[in-house]
Every structure is written in C-alpha cells, then in structure tokens.
Image (tube, rainbow, N blue to C red):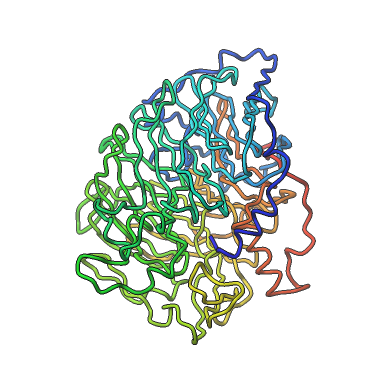
Amino acid sequence: MLAMLINRMAIIFVFASALFLNSAHVFPQEFNSVERFKTISEAELIKPDDEDWLIWRRTYDAQGHSPLDQINKSNIDGLAEVWRVELEQGPNMATPLVHNGVMFLASAQDSVLALDATTGEQLWEYKHRPTGFPSPRIGIALHGDKVIVPTQNMQVVALKVATGELIWKHEIETPQHEEPLRLPYSLRGAPMVANGVVLQGVTATMIPEGGFLVGLDLETGDELWRFHSIARPGEPGGNTWNNLALEDRSGGSVWVPASYDPELDLAYYGTAPTYDTAPLLHSLNKEGVSNEALYTNATIALRPKTGELAWFFQHMPNDQWDLDWVFERQIVELGIGGNSRKVVLTAGKMALFDVLDAATGEYLDSFDVGLQNIVTAIDPHTGNKTINPRAIPNAEDSNLLCPMANAGRNWPSASINPTTRMLYLPLSEICMMFGPTSDTRTLLSTGVSIVPQPTLNSDGKFGRVQAINLETGEMVWDFREVAPPVSATLSTAGGVVFVGTLDNRFVALDEKNGETLWENELGDIPNSFPISYGVNGKQYIAIVVGQPSVYHATVLKSYIDGFLGDESPLVDLPRAGPALVVYALVSD
C-alpha cells in the first residue's frame, strides 16, 4: 500500500457510520427452510461436498477451484443472470460462502446476510453496531453451528448459522500509542477455523509494533494465543531490524486469510512488508545485526492450537518498494526432482513465484511470469534474490521499475485446477518511474518520488490473466486487454476460467487457450472473489460488484485514465451500485 494513499483514504472513508452507538442487532426473517441450516463439520471443511463453497477459496488448500462441470465450454452461451441482490455502499472484497443451498455474505458496514442461494431471498440479516473505520474485508468463516465474522471495530463475532443471533463476541486488544494513528488497526482477512481454533490476522499498516495473528477459542471467542509478525528485540529474528526499538518497527500486516494442511496440522500465512523503509535501507554492518526485517514478506507456518511457529521463509528481505508477499499460500502436490512433493506456492506483487516444501519450508524452486525487473537472479539452493542495483532508492537517478506497488499481481487471487496443475493468475501491467528525491508523492519513507508508467514498449493493454503449467513453470497462454482483472480467477471442472475486469465485465475464458467464451456486463466494478456452487444439481456462479477498494481498483482506474486520457475505456463507465450477482444456465 502506498503511503501517498493513506491520508486520502482517511479523508474519504471517515463518515457517520463510525459514530453509531447502538448495540448489535439481528433481524431474522420468516422462512420455511430451517432444516437447510445444517451444521458444518470439520470433515466437511476438509473434504467439502462438490456443491458447497465453505471457505474463502473453497478448500483449505486455497486453490479457488470448483469441481462442478454443468457449466462448460459446450453450453456457456446459455449462461445468464438469474438473480441479483443490492448491497450496502462501502469498500469491501467480499466472498460469498454456500452450504446446503444457503448463502452467507458479509457486506460493507458490518452487515451479514443469509440468503436462499437459488433465489436471493433473505433468510436473516445481522447488523453489527457500533461499527468502526470502514475497511474492506475479504470474508467470513463457517464451522459447526456458527458463522464467524470479523468487524470494522476490531471484534470477531460468532452468529448462529440458522438465525443470525449472536453467540459470542470478542474484541481484539491492541497496543495503546501516544501518537494518533494515520490508519487504525483492521481485520481485512477472513477468519479460518483450523483444528478447532479461529485464526484471525490483523492489519497494522504503519502502526508501531506491527501486525499480528490471534487464535480464538471456537466456543467462547477467548484469545488462546498471539503471534507477532514483527520480531521483538531479544527474541528470534529480533536482531534483523537494524537495532530499531520496538516502537520504531512497523508493518508485517496479515490481511489475507490462511491456508491449512490438516495432515501436517499447519496453517500458512503471508505477511506484508514494513512501510517505514528508510531506517532499513542500508545495513549497519554490525555483527549480529541485519536489516532483513523479520517476519515481513514471509511465509509463516503455525500450529493452530498453540500459535507455535513451525517454520518460516522470507521471500523478500528489506523490501523498499511495497511489493508485498502477503497473498494466498496455495497447497498443491507437484513433481519435484522426480518425486511428488506437497508444496506451498506463493508470489508477491512481482508475480515471481517461490515453491516451498509444505512440511519444512525448504526452498525448492521459483518461476517468473516476466513482468518484474527488480530481481535479477535467484540462488537455486536458498532462494535468495539478487536485487537490480538500479532499484535501490537513491536521491539522484530515475529508473523504470516494474511493477507499480498497486499493480502486478495483487490481492485478486490465482486459482489452480488440481487435475491439470494449471494456475490462472490475474495481473496488472503497470510500472513506476522511481526517483529522484521529491517532497511529494514519494514511495513509503524513502523520500524517492514515484510516478505510474506503462511498461516499456507498452501496447496499451494493462490487464493480463496468465496461465502457468505448475509442473514445468511454462507460461502456457495469456489473456490481455486494456482493463486489468480486479477479481480473483475462478477455475472450474467445466474447462472454464472466470474473472471480473475493471471495465465492469465478467469474462469466461477457455482453460486450454485463454480464448473468450462468454462475457457479461455487470453494471459495476467486480472487486471481489467469485465462487461457484450447486443446489440440487444446478450449478451457479456468484460475484459481488460495486464495493471497490481504494488501494486497488480505484487506483488502477486513475492510472489508466491518466495514461490514455479520453481514449480510456474506463471513463464514464456506469456505476449501478453494490450488488451480489448470480448466474446459471437458462433454457431457451
């Protein structure tokens, strides 16, 4: 996240909802389908019914793939909108969840809905009060008889799955600071229930002492443990901060949900960089002290019951460019060195993937989609990266660096077809002119100026979906257009990959070659995570629109409009407003 956006966001999103003083409310509706509100077992989370979407990316391995194939390449021309529900205004990055024909959705302004997944009829609604500073959130969690919801005022609440009534609420305690915060703490990532514990990451942006993770008791909400993603002085990793005092360390936010391997009993999280980069730019050259800034830009593997750190791998030490490695950790079986290995796969904003052993964190491999120019070499044994000298911040030189911090691969998640071992990655091809020193529009605390720029020799297409063969690292095909993808991709067993784009379209691509099979006008920006689910043998596709994030979709639009002027296809697009849009095959 760019420092230049922080104040803008604070101005835009401070409004009256933060002042509500009434308590939480639930508004159950009359309906005749109580029997559909079945509890969700641990076994179902591990191996969900094909028609259900129970976790943020459907399964614990975060692959974002649906095994349903009723909607396929042969009949997709018959796909049409079958229902739409209007939602509240506000920033959000919603992921609907579906179990046994009931859809659960956290909207903006701390509202949670239970809907009939075939019609959109509201079954119950929960409104949390008081709400807090508006912040986009990725979703919720389901387990047993509970819907687990993170709120804007730093609470996690558990609701009855059948009625929306409150079971428990827990306020996550945060350190007190003498200076006012530029942005408050927030809970952006969806919670995850792993081995009976609710896991929740905390976003801390530029707050002293940084982000952290908590484990909460599933039955009471009580905090069981806390893991700090900024290493403390005197603790392991504490000597990697150039001898900075704890109050001068920040970052390490945890704003993307976990993945989890039940066999290994490990939960995998990614962490963001620090945003106060200037004190870490150069090493002190002091024995026993480094400027790597653990545990920023790392994969951390934790034991859900205790919060114990099993292993970690830092992908990008001393990140001076806000090129987060915070995004999804996908678990997949791959052939490595002639043997099948269970691996954790992840990429930061550079779209440079690291492959790690899921049990030990051992570095195995890397592959690059060809967008970035910051890393010039990778040690094949350790994964250590060599930084392009032109990328090091300095007060005099200007260099084109790729990608821009709001571009590249970003929060829209990739999906993996576990049968074909193909990964589908959304990308934005936008770079930045870096330097010289400026008093305005600087990157983080470097003092170095940044200006968004197209890629070198750009053809005016800023959006890409990249298909990658995970067994070989081969870039199989790419789908490129002017408008970048701003939703996650959704892979399906029907041979179709879905993605939403910045020009309000929902597009279906052929998984074999990336050709467009179908598209539909959504009416607003699809700034969310699409899902597929089924009810009684009928397959549906769902996506939320109209709740764009200031950190991503809104900023990308401003960049492209600036590049293209009146020729930009994003100028004067309709804004129909926030809605949940659902598609299915319709007969003639």
Q: Which of 506 and 122 is in front in this view?
A: 122
Residue 240 x %, y %: 29, 61
- Is residue 95 left or right of 388 when viewed as pictured? right
Quadrant position of the C terminus in the picture: top right
Determine the residue positioned at 26% across, 35% down: 263
The image quarter in which residue 241 lies: bottom left
Q: In x, y percent, where is residue 400?
A: 51, 80
On the image, which quarter does residue 113 sit in?
Answer: top right
Report the front residue among 212 and 511. Answer: 212
Residue at 49%, 86% in the rendered image: 397
Note whether 95 is above or below 380 in the view shown: above
Asked whether residue 51 is in view, the answer is no
Residue 205 location (% of width, % of height): 50, 54
| Whether residue 214 is situated above or below residue 288 in the rendered picture | above
Residue pictured at 28% horizontal, 38% vertical: 303
Residue 172 makes an appearance in the image: yes
Q: Is residue 524 left or right of residue 449?
A: right
At which x and y percent is residue 84? 72, 36
Extreme-bottom residue of the structure: 396
- Does 401 appear above or below 153? below
In the rendered view, tell whether residue 310 sits above or below residue 404. Answer: above
Q: Residue furthest front?
A: 178
